[in-house]
């Protein structure tokens, strides 16, 4: 008899959330993680001796429902207040946004911001039950399934007639149209579009529902304002690991899963366990994958177990990452003209067009000539990331296409690194003289190191055709899959990526049904 009821592939945050909830419900759970530590795309990494960075900058997306379900406060987890997001300007006249307050922008824009934010907060609230539900396949199921949609529709109806129409209109807008009908300040426009487009193959003019990821983020803490766990991002991973262990979950690191064991007879197929890269086989009747959908189906399940139409759908999922990560070990904190506090997140995205033009290069397989960026100094929240007096800088850089046209040759990589540093130097003069060591991770590197196809932030575009009851695609969008016994619980499942914990939570509920 197997020692485990469920095997979970991956100890990223969703794998750990799912494992903990299953174990709390009395299941015997084993988590198998390919890497040496937990956290997945949200883990910390040492990139130079004595210098570490968290891969994710903030925990704004994290769901308060997951916090409660896992009692993460009981693990000592707490979060900072909302921190400012600052749109850097070369001349030192930066724009800054936190809560309802906007400084450094046109007065009329600052005055209009609270009403704009209140509207988006209302819409994010309307979607809360949708993010936390399993969305039934259209046309399938009975009364219980229909009630999920009925509840969502009722929430929309409760907005009232005028706001209801506005909600539907706003949901379908490109970021640029959403923002420029209210705001005129170019720096504020760039800043406000950032959270709709980052992580996806999208720019402010892209028509494919950038408002959706923005509203998912706003379902998290501080209504989507930047925030960090007290003690730094690693505190979140540590709390999740501790909750899992307390619930009785067994976790094995350095344990890459090579394939799922699927047995079949005239009555159909069923997963019965997994085989590790080492050849070791482990049995369980429930296999839950927090790996991205392409990896899960094409590699771990294998196409011979899937029908051709489903295989085609998975093959065609849009999941090519667009974000690179630049890390620098600094001899000291830089000084930025016009900015005293470096504890928030800083954007180099001075206008809509700066983001759009950076994106245009990447559409044709080239890394941006003039990249746009999100910068943090994580050692300000967690001094243990760098030796005394020294600091680390972490930068999300857009756009860096996964399928760069030279295949990320050494020349392409080094040219892009040069452009990243050159851009940083323009906004933070003198920064390069503080750099002790640096690394640039392209989406291809992220794929290799974190086992996520395309190095994609969301394990697959969070765009309308890959969202809601279609995420990642039909016949795998309710956490179960065409193979009985195989479930999805990672960012590739509804409601998507970012560190929300919701796919892990929702999947556990489905598995326990
Ligand atoms: C550069 C970058 C920056 C980001 N910054 C932020 C941010 O600031 N805020 C935010 O909210 N989100 C951010 N994100 C997105 C967020 O990190 C991801 O959406 C989130 O981590 C996904 O969580 P997950 O648990 O679903 O998957 P993952 O974190 O990808 O975890 C999956 C785990 O499964 C393991 N695995 C995969 N295949 C196997 C296998 N065969 N065998 C064993 N183990 C396997 C992997 O090693 C990994 O540990 C960022 C993403 C990137 C790429």
Image (cartoon, rainbow, N blue to C red):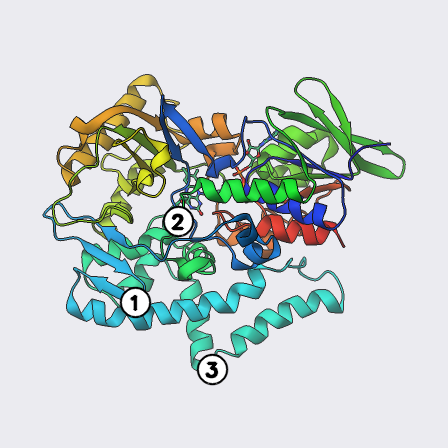
> The N terminus lies in which quarter of the figure?
top right
State left or right for residue 474 relative to residue 351. Answer: right
**Which residue is labeled 3 in the image?**
161
> Badge 3: few (under 14), some or many (20 or more) residues near its Cα, within 10 Å?
few
Q: Which mark is residue 100?
A: 1
Q: Position of residue 301 (x, y in %)?
A: 69, 32
- Which-is-in-front pick, marks 3 and 2? 2
Q: Which mark is residue 431?
A: none
- Label 1 Cα neighbours within 10 Å, binned few <14 / some 14-19 / many ≥20: some
To which residue does mark 2 refer?
Answer: 228
Instruction: Tell me the distance, in whole angstroms, between the alpha carbons under discs 3 and 2.
Output: 37 Å
Residue visible at 29% across and 37% down in the picture: 361
Does label 2 or label 1 sit earlier along the sequence? 1
Secondary structure, mark 2, is loop
- In the picture, measured across the screen, residue 2 lies left or right of residue 147, that is right
Q: Which quadrant would the C terminus be assigned to in this image? A: bottom right
298 relative to 222 in the view: left or right: right
| Vertical position of residue 169 compared to residue 374: above or below | below
| Residue 452 position in % (x across, y down) | 52, 33
């Amino acid at each position: 008899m197997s020692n485990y009821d469920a095997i979970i592939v991956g100890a990223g945050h969703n794998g750990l959330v799912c494992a903990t909830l299953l174990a709390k419900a009395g299941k015997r759970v084993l988590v198998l993680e390919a890497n040496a530590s937990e956290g997945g795309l949200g883990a910390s990494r040492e990139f130079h001796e004595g210098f570490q960075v968290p891969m994710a900058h903030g925990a704004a997306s994290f769901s308060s429902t997951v916090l409660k379900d896992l009692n993460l406060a009981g693990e000592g987890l707490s979060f900072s207040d909302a921190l400012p997001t600052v749109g850097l300007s070369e001349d030192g006249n930066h724009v800054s946004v936190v809560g309802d307050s906007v400084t450094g922008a046109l007065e009329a824009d600052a005055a209009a911001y609270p009403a704009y934010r209140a509207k988006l907060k209302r819409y994010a609230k309307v979607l809360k039950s949708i993010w936390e539900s399993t969305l039934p396949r259209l046309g399938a199921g009975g009364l219980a399934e229909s009630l999920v949609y009925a509840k969502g529709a009722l929430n929309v109806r409760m907005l009232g007639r005028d706001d209801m129409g506005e909600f539907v209109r706003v949901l379908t807008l490109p970021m640029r149209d959403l923002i420029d009908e209210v705001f005129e300040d170019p720096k504020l426009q760039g800043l406000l579009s950032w959270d709709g487009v980052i992580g996806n193959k999208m720019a402010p003019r892209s028509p494919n529902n950038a408002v959706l990821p923005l509203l998912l983020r706003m379902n998290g803490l501080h209504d989507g304002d930047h925030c960090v766990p007290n003690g730094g991002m690693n505190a979140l991973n540590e709390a999740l690991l501790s909750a899992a262990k307390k619930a009785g979950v067994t976790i094995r690191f350095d344990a890459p899963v090579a394939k799922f064991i699927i047995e079949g007879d005239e009555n159909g197929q069923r997963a019965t366990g997994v085989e590790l890269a080492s050849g070791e086989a482990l049995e369980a009747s429930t296999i839950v994958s927090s790996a991205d959908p392409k990896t899960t189906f094409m590699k771990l399940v294998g196409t011979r177990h899937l029908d051709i139409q489903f295989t085609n759908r998975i093959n065609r999922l849009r999941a090519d990452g667009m974000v690179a990560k630049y890390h620098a070990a600094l001899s000291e904190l830089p000084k930025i003209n016009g900015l005293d506090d470096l504890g928030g997140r800083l954007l180099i995205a001075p206008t809509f067009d700066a983001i759009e033009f950076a994106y245009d290069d990447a559409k044709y397989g080239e890394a941006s000539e003039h990249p746009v960026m999100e910068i943090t100094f994580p050692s300000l929240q967690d001094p243990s990331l760098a030796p005394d007096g020294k600091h680390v800088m972490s930068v999300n850089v857009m756009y860096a296409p996964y399928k760069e046209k030279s295949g990320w040759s050494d020349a392409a990589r080094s040219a892009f690194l040069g452009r990243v540093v050159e851009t940083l130097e323009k906004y933070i003069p003198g920064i390069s003289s503080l750099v002790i060591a640096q690394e640039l991770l392209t989406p291809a590197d992220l794929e290799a190191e974190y086992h996520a196809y395309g190095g994609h932030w969301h394990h697959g575009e969070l765009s309308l055709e890959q969202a809601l009851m279609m995420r990642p695609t039909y016949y795998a969008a309710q956490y179960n899959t065409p193979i009985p016994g195989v479930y999805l619980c990672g960012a590739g499942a509804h409601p998507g990526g970012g560190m929300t914990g919701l796919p892990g939570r929702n999947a556990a509920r489905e598995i326990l049904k």
